[in-house]
Amino acid sequence: MGDLTQENIVESENNGSNIGEIMLRLLPMALCVVALVIMLKDSQTNDYGSLSYSDLGIFRYLVHANGICAAYSLLSAIVAALPRPTTLPRAWTIFLLDQILTYIILAAAAASTEVIYLAYKGDTDITWSETCGSFGVFCKKATASVSITFIVSLCYVGISLLSSYRLFSKYEAPIGQDNNKGGIEIANY
């Protein structure tokens, strides 16, 4: 039997949380690829014409955002799996990239949702009729892709919370100076 020293216990806890983090980072990769493939194959032709994801700029953005997030998820899972100690610059880099990718994928999903809403409901003020009556298959696939992208957004929110917790719980804030020369005074409670 191995030693149950404090060092071994901490090491085994880190391995467990590291595996959890790796899995959390790989989950959005798989979901991004699924959403991307659904949207790439989304096209429909009928008596009214043809409609493809590439006809709408926001859906092209959604495809690119899913591709970027899938690649980042894979890369960040590999980085998380490397057995190196976390340094302050590395923790900040991971935190900032997680934040940026969270906002990129959330913006893609939100903007695509508006386009899908208009496709289903139309907008009578600008005489834009609903399209999903004529292109129902297209709308269903687009809705599925956007729904999966929102699940990816939730995964990235979790990843962002994890990286911010790791950053701000491990490293302390800079120590303020008592002799504030010409700066703004901040009350301490």
Image (tube, helix red, strand yellow):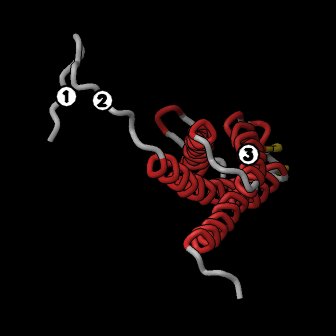
Query: Where, by quadrant of the figure, is residue 92 drawn?
Result: top right
Which residue: 66% across, 48% down?
131
Name which of mark 3 and mark 2 comes first in the sequence.
Answer: 3
Name which of mark 1 and mark 3 comes first in the sequence.
Answer: 3
Q: Nearer the viewer, residue 3 or 139?
A: 3
Q: Position of residue 172 (x, y in %)?
A: 41, 43
Residue matched to label 3: 72
85 on left or right of 163: right
Are the two marked residues, 2 and 1, in contact with CB atoms closer than 8 angstroms? Answer: yes
Q: Residue 186 has which mark?
A: 1
Q: Secondary structure at mark 2?
A: loop
Looking at numbered disc 1 in the image, what kind of residue is underneath it?
Ile
Residue matched to label 2: 176
Locate the N terminus and report the quarter of the image it occupies. Answer: bottom right
Looking at numbered disc 3 in the image, what kind of residue is underneath it?
Tyr
125 on left or right of 98: left
Looking at numbered disc 2 in the image, what kind of residue is underneath it?
Gly
Q: Position of residue 80 (x, y in %)?
A: 70, 54
